[in-house]
Image (cartoon, rainbow, N blue to C red):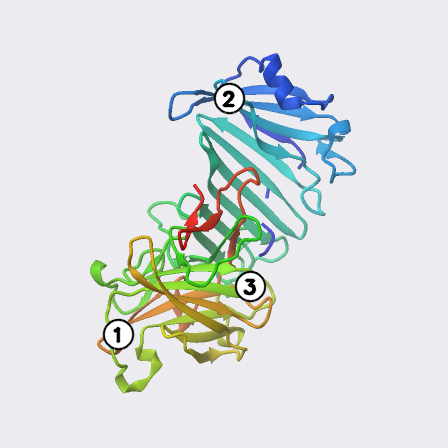
Amino acid sequence: MKPLLLAACVLVLPVAALAAPDAAQTAAICGQRTSCKVEKTYDAGRSPDGTSLAVVQVRLGLADKPKDQDEGCIDGDARDGGTEYWLLAGTAAPRQVLQLCNDGYGSSGVGEDEVEVGPNRLVHHQSGGSSWRWSMEVTYSLAPFGALTERDCSYHNVSEQSGTLTDIDYRTRLVRALAKDSTRRELGVGCPSWPKPPQTFAARVDAETLGAYPVVAPGLPGKAAIPAGTALGNCVPGMTTAGDNGFVVWGKPAAADQAAEIRTIGVGTNSLIVQVFDPVPPAAPSGGSWIHLSHLEIWVGQNGEEINTMLPLGQMTQTGITLDGAVHRGIGKPGPPPRVERWTARDERSRPVTVLRLVWPDEFALINGVTVVYSQAEAGKQARLVASAGFAGNRPIYVPDVQTLAGRPSTSDSGLCRVQGGRLVAID
């Protein structure tokens, strides 16, 4: 994944200042750290059940700097031990919700943090980088605690064609991305802007900006694996041939009762698991070609120059996979096909689904982006194509990077899934 902009300061925008935490709360927060000092306390409104909430910001001296920071954390022109944010919820024990140590956040030393506290919300803005600059904005619910949304920007500071903006909804694990049309010039350095009404998210937002739904690689606790026989439950949302969470790039969208649903997750840098529910009965293909069977098309980027949009055919590899697990060579740059493992299961709605695990022999086969396409057949003929990106010239116009969700922050389960009851489900 490319690096993810915001120098060495922390700014907190309070709703209202409160009295400092009492002695017992301060002791619970600081423990044996003698340099720990309460800097500010902020009103965070109330939880859904009416419990009063506050966020306490503490500052640490160099004596209590993180063990992995030899020089400590940047605080303006000085160094210290960083800053922490702790949640006070009624009479419950204080809970740390954010720990920050600005070490420059990249070799350019331009790192910056900004924190805003509001009613049952904490918003963290962070930026940094080197030649690749990045920024992120994460919005947290305080009660219950967890990440709600995240928006990340990543761009190269001398390349106008680079620049990706990624929007993550942790509640649904729906990820959307915007990137620049690499064939355009004079785009300016930086990331695209999220569309504002009346613009909408689309495969082509405007003449300079392309949109896509990246494959999500959800975090799994520990070293958990996904065994054969597992269905993909509510861990990731589905793309449908009716046009949900994808783009119908050929044919007309399916009626709701005839819509196929495709769920895809990434596993590591060379594997996908794809689940298909298709209510349309299979039929013998017209002319005997696999093209007229319901099938997947996996387009893998082969561009090593950090460009994911408007690639020529020679910088992508297409692989066709029918629902029986058979692999068919497509067009584009030749490459070793994936090994396919197939099983059937039932999803959380008890619908019969076909699950395909695809593993490429190259350990890093997917690091330059992936577009997933499903071709739904009717009466033995190709009826429509739905894709995670737009198409032009019979190929994807954007092959977005796989988006890894590893838990945001490490003290939260946001973005994580686990295998439970034979299905991959979101951790609430």
Q: Quick check: 171 left or right of 36?
A: left
The answer to which quarter of the image holds residue 81 is: top right
Q: Which residue is mark 3?
A: 307
The relative height of residue 244 versus residue 96 in the rendered view (above or below) is below
Name the residue: 59% across, 44% down.
5
Residue 97: x percent and y percent? 56, 31
Question: CB of mark 1 within 8 Å of CB of mark 2?
Answer: no
Distance between the alpha carbons at the discs numbered 3 and 1: 38 Å
Q: Is residue 234 visible?
A: yes
Q: Which mark is residue 92?
A: 2
Q: Which mark is residue 282?
A: 1
- Element under disc 2: loop
Q: Residues within 10 Å of mark 1 (few under 14, many from 20)?
A: some
Q: Nearer the viewer, mark 2 or mark 3?
A: 2
The relative height of residue 20 versus residue 44 in the rendered view (above or below) is above
The answer to which quarter of the image holds residue 396 is: bottom left
Q: Please tell me which of labels 1 and 2 falls first in the chain.
A: 2
Distance between the alpha carbons at the discs numbered 2 and 3: 49 Å
Q: Quadrant of the C terminus?
A: top left
The relative height of residue 36 versus residue 163 in the rendered view (above or below) is above
- Element under disc 3: loop
Work out which residue is located at the far front of the displayed protein and give it.
421
User: Which residue occupies the foreground of this view, 181 or 286?
Assistant: 286
Q: Quadrant of the N terminus?
A: bottom right
Q: Please tell me which of labels 2 and 3 falls first in the chain.
A: 2
